[in-house]
Amino acid sequence: MTQEALNILLIISALLLVDLYVLHGLQGAFQKWKFLRKREFSFFYWAANAILIGGLLIGAYIPVVGLGVRAAGLLGFSLIFIGKLAFLPFLLADDIRRLRVWHKNRFKNLSANSPTVPIPDAIPRSEFLLKAGLLAGAVPLAAIKIEMPKGLYDYHVRYQTLYLPNLPKAFDGIKLGQISDIHSGSFYKKKAVLGGVEMLLKEKPDLIFFTGDLVNGQASEMNDYQDIFAKVKAPLGVYSSLGNHDYGDYGDWPNPLDKIKNHQDLIQTHKNMGWDLLLNENRRLKVDGEEIGILGIENWGEYSRFPKYGRMDLATKNTDDLPVKLLLSHDPSHWRAQVLKDYPQIDAMFSGHTHGMQFGVRTDDFQWSPIEMIYKEWAGHYQQGSQQLYVNVGYGFVGLYGRVGILPEITIFTLKAGHNPSVKQA
C-alpha cells in the first residue's frame, strides 16, 4: 500500500469515527426524537456524510476532475465539518460528565459492598448540554451565511516589500500595485466597485499589474464596468495578462466564430482601458536610463483541463540582458510546475486565480483555506531560493457569491534593491 493510499484510508477512518460518535451522541441525548433511531434517518445520515467525505477526497486527491467541482467539494465538506467541530466539545464534555458520575457511583457501590456498578452507557446523557452543542454548531454556519455577502466588496489593501538583489537603483522604492480576478460578470454594485478602484489609485502606484480573469466568460460583461476600470492608470503603465476565464472556454457558443470574436472583443477591452495586455511577450521598462523586464504569458495552469496557452519561450525572448524580470502569470501552479524548474531568470511572478476559495482565515501571521489542499501556493508571498511568487486572492468573485475571511485584495508592493534582511542567506 502506498503512503498516499494509507493517508486516504486513515482520513476516511477518522472521519467515519467522528460521524459515528456524533450520531451515537445525538441518539443517546434526544430519546424523544424517535426519528433519530429510524432506519431511514441512519441511511440519510451516512449517505450525506459519504457524499461530504467523497467531496473532500475528490478535492484533495483527484486532479483530473474540474477545479470548480474540486473546490465545491472542499467547501461543502469544510462548512459542515466546522459545525461538527463546534458540536464535539459539548459531546466530549457530556462524556466526561458521565464518566465522573460512573466513577462516583462505582466508589459508592464498592463502599457498600454492592456488586452493581452502572456502566457509562447506562448513565443518561445531558439533553441540555447537547442542545447547547447543536446551537453552538449552528452558530458558525449561520454567521458564515450572514457574513458572506458582506465580504464581496470589502476591499482591503495589503502591503508587501519585494526585495530584488539585482534591482537597478532607479527602481529602488518604486510602488507597484496589483489587482487580479475582476470577474465583472458577477458584480451588481457599481458604486462599490468604483470604491475599490479609488482605494487603489489613492495609493499612487508607479505601475500596476492585472493578472487575469477580467470576465467570467463573455467580453460583454465589461460593458457596464469598462469606464470604471479605465480609471486604473499609473505613470509607468498598467500591464495585464489573461486568465482561464478570459477565453470563453466555460461557455457554449453557437459556432466557433462567436467564441473567436468574443476573445477579440476582450483583447480590445484591455486596449480601450489603456492597459498593455501581454500575450506571451515582454516589455522593457526604462527609468533614468536603467531597465527591467515586464513579462506576461497567457493562461498556463498545471491542474486545468483547458489548454495551456502560455509560452514562456516567447515571453522571455530577448530578455537575457535585463537584470530583473517580473512575470505576470494568472495561475500560481505555473510557478512550481514550470518557472522554478526551467526559468531561473524569473525574479518574481505575480498571480491570482485561487481567490483563496473566498473562504478561510487570513491574518498577518496565519492563513488557512480549504484551497490549500489543491494549491500549495494560494495566497500571499512565497520564496524559493532567489525566486519569488505573490498570489493575489482577487478583486471580484465567481461561483460562490460571498467571501468569508478571505477578502477582496488590492496589493501594493514596494520594490527594494538588495536581500530581505529577515531571510537568512545561504
Image: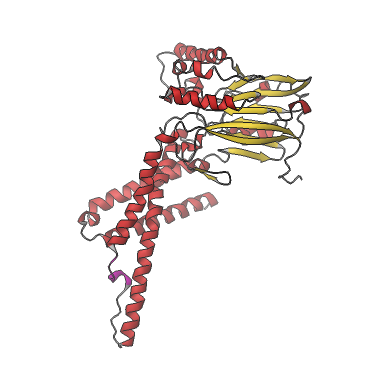
Position of 259 compared to 32: left or right?
A: right
Q: Residue at position x 32%, y 52% from top?
A: 135
Task: Report x, y in % for residue 343.
Answer: 70, 31
Tell me, what colour scheme is on the image? secondary structure
Task: Report x, y in % for residue 80.
Answer: 38, 47
Task: Report x, y in % for residue 377.
Answer: 58, 39
Judging depth in this view, the residue of 399 and 108 nearest the camera is 108
Judging depth in this view, the residue of 348 and 37 nearest the camera is 348
Task: Report x, y in % for residue 316.
Answer: 70, 23
Residue sitting farthest toward the front: 202
Compared to 55, does 46 lie above or below? below
Position of 310 compared to 252: left or right?
A: right
Compared to 164, does 237 lie above or below? above
- Residue 396 shows up from this direction: yes
Judging depth in this view, the residue of 204 and 183 nearest the camera is 204
Highlighted range, magenta: 120-125
